[in-house]
Amino acid sequence: MFRRHHGHGMREHAHGSHDHHGHDPRLFAFGPMRPPFGPGGFGPGGRGHGRGRGRRGNTRAAVLGLLLERPMHGYEMISELETRTGGVWRPSPGSIYPTLQLLEDEGLIVSEEADGRKRFTLTEAGRAEADRATDAGHGRPWQEFDADHIAQAQEFREAGFAVMSALRQVAMTGTPTQRQKALETLQDTKRKLYAILAE
């Protein structure tokens, strides 16, 4: 008897998880909220900054520029770039570590194992390339971020979170017609944003 009652209760609970429009909100869950532009979304060469410049190319310049100051390990570079740009640019490990491997393969840096971490140092060739980039004005990508840029990037983040929150509400509680209108609004907004870049 207890099993039957328990099973019925479970069915009632499952049925009760549907909202008042009759659809299961889990189908429209977005998962944990994350920064809407992703890690390093406003970094040099990333979405939202500059045109025609590869992100890895700027990560390369940043790595060489940092190592020109002192030897560092990968995570230290990530933290330094985040700090120097006011949290606007935090390169992901998937950007930093392949760049380090490439620079090592090219003979521009060498690594040394210490306390379970690889610490990287410029070779003479690497120092020469970093000096050339600095002389040309490209050796300190983090200096591209001024106070206005950092403030505007924060405004973008806040606006992105607000839009995601509104989208979540429509997806979870809206009627099918309302959800369709929301999708059309998103598509129209996307077109307008790309049109801004084309101006």
Image: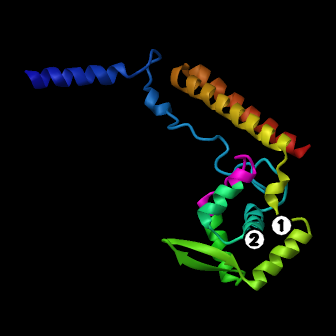
Q: Tell me whether circle 2 and circle 1 mark residues in contact (CB < 8 Å).
A: yes
Region of the chain picked out in magenta, as a range: 82-95
Residue 92 inside the magenta-drawn segment: yes
> 109 or 94: which is nearer to us?
109
User: Where 70 sits versus 191, above or below?
Assistant: below
User: In the image as oriented, which residue stretches furthest toward the left?
Assistant: 1
Tell me where residue 53 appears, x and y as whole percent.
82, 61
- Mark 1 secondary-structure assignment: loop
Q: Residue at x 76, y 41 (%)?
A: 153
Residue 91 inside the magenta-drawn segment: yes
Q: Residue at x 83, y 66 (%)?
A: 139
- Residue 32's mark? none
Quarter of the C terminus within the rendering: top right
Q: Amino acid at mark 1?
A: Gly
Residue 30 in the figure: left or right of residue 59: left
- Nearest to N terminus: mark 2 or mark 1: 2
Tell me where residue 163 appears, x and y as whole percent.
67, 29
Q: Amino acid at mark 2?
A: Leu
Residue 84 in the figure: left or right of residue 20: right
Residue 119 quadrant: bottom right
Q: Residue at x 73, y 64 (%)?
A: 59
User: In the image as oriented, which residue stretches furthest toward the top?
Assistant: 20
Residue 6 quadrant: top left
Quarter of the N terminus within the rendering: top left
- Residue 139's mark? 1
- Mark 2 secondary-structure assignment: helix
- Residue 64's mark? 2
User: Circle 2: is it few (<14), some (14-19), or many (20+) Cα within 10 Å?
Assistant: many
Tell me where residue 181 appears, x and y as whole percent.
66, 24
Residue 148 quadrant: top right
User: Where 128 sits versus 115, above or below?
Assistant: below
